[in-house]
């Protein structure tokens, strides 16, 4: 095996560089070393670049969404062997602390968002994954890298969002944000039995993309029409049975609760850059439930199973694919939403 590899590093101040780095070594008996076969760029990577993630450390290798092949495991790893194909959870978690035992892995006492934030991530040829038994999910032969790529982050977030909104069979669900997480949320709402999904976004290209892939039953641009009225008309006048806010934009938080019918659940998966206000005096009697969260990505095995059964498919969201050599171009295209980019997938470095 090689001793060095190429890796995308985020320097202090946010500059990116594709650099030669040592191939990581195992540090703990529960670690695994994974050869990355496909990774992506995520909006959270852009947040690190902007300096909006205080826990991020300088000169870290970015990336937390990937699939790969296990090449080495520590002595305490039980469920994985070299050669296994795996997808990775974006959250590092131990699997046995108080929070992990209850499925609240986002608040693991010994983990959190580590990969590509506090420790070197997956926009590289190899990555060291701590607590490998907890954080890696084996892929069956019938599930391709492309099909499994989003499982550990945006698809988990979409499923989490649909759960926060307590989607039940027959519900009409409104999802704010037609980016990768919103598109995954729409799919998961259908998986949970929603009879209709409305997607709302101010970007006409994203709505057109969603429509072209039949990702929603109603597409609404709040800049072009009264979104609350449109969703009410679509729900027989009552409002959405569940709402997921996956945009985090100007005014999207207040739009979320205004779209909801009385007694609905509003799930907030968006990351805000500013404080939001909850005008309780205006919603008194509407009897809403609000649930917020960073993804507890504990359903990776189930998501992989649903993908294998053909009940979930996110391959069409990978609008761009290029080798690690071109990742700087990928950041530019993804960050500026050029060329209709929804997800930029990264294949291994080519020598
Ligand atoms: Zn992410
Ligand atoms: Zn834990």
Image (cartoon, rainbow, N blue to C red):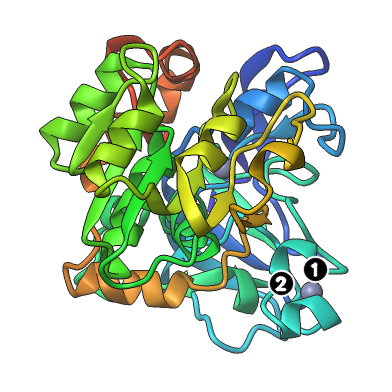
Q: Secondary structure at mark 2?
A: loop
Residue at position x 62%, y 79% from top?
Answer: 133
Residue 31, position as x, y percentages in the image: 70, 69
Quick check: 351 left or right of 293?
left
Answer yes or no: is residue 351 visible: no
How would you rate the neighbour count of disc 1 (Cα within 10 Å): few for under 14, some for 14-19, many for 20 or more? many
Question: Between marks 1 and 2, how big is the CA–CA gap?
Answer: 7 Å
Callout in the foreground (1, 2): 2
Give the numbered dot on residue 104. 2
Viewer-proximal residue among 130 and 125: 130
Q: Say if disc 1 is inside 8 Å of ligand 2.
A: yes
Label count reads 2
Residue 155 quadrant: bottom left
Residue at position x 32%, y 40% from top?
Answer: 232
Residue 197, position as x, y percentages in the image: 27, 49
Viewer-proximal residue among 70 and 23: 70
Residue at position x 66%, y 36% from top?
Answer: 271
Quick check: 326 left or right of 92?
left
């Amino acid at each position: 095996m090689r001793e060095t590899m190429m890796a995308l590093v985020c320097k202090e101040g946010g500059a990116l560089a594709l650099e030669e780095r040592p191939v990581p070594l195992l540090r703990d008996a529960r670690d695994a070393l994974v050869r990355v076969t496909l990774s992506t760029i995520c909006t959270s990577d852009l947040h690190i670049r902007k300096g909006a993630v205080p826990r991020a450390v300088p000169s870290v290798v970015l990336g937390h969404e990937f699939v790969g092949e296990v090449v080495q495991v520590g002595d305490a790893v039980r469920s994985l062997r070299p050669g296994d194909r795996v997808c990775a959870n974006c959250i590092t978690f131990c699997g046995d602390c108080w929070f992990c035992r209850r499925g609240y892995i986002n608040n693991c006492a010994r983990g959190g968002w580590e990969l590509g934030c506090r420790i070197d991530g997956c926009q590289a040829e190899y990555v060291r994954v701590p607590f490998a038994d907890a954080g890696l999910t084996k892929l069956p032969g019938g599930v391709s890298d492309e099909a499994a790529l989003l499982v550990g982050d945006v698809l988990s977030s979409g499923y989490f969002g649909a759960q926060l909104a307590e989607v039940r069979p027959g519900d009409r669900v409104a999802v704010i944000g037609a980016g990768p997480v919103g598109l995954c949320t729409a799919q998961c709402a259908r998986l949970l039995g929603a009879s209709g999904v409305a997607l709302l976004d101010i970007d006409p290209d994203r709505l057109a993309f969603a429509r072209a892939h039949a990702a929603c039953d109603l597409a609404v641009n709040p800049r072009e029409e009264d979104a609350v009225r449109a969703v009410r008309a679509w729900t027989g006048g009552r409002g959405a049975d569940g709402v997921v806010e996956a945009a985090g934009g100007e005014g999207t938080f207040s739009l979320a609760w205004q779209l909801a019918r009385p007694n609905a659940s509003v799930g907030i998966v968006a990351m805000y850059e500013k404080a939001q206000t909850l005008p309780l005096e205006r919603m008194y009697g509407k009897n809403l439930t609000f649930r917020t969260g960073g993804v507890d990505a504990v359903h990776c095995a189930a998501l992989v199973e649903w993908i294998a059964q053909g009940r979930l498919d996110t391959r069409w969201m990978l609008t761009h694919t290029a080798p690690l050599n071109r990742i700087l171009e990928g950041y530019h295209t993804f960050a500026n939403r050029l060329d209709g980019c929804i997800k930029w997938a990264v294949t291994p470095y080519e020598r």
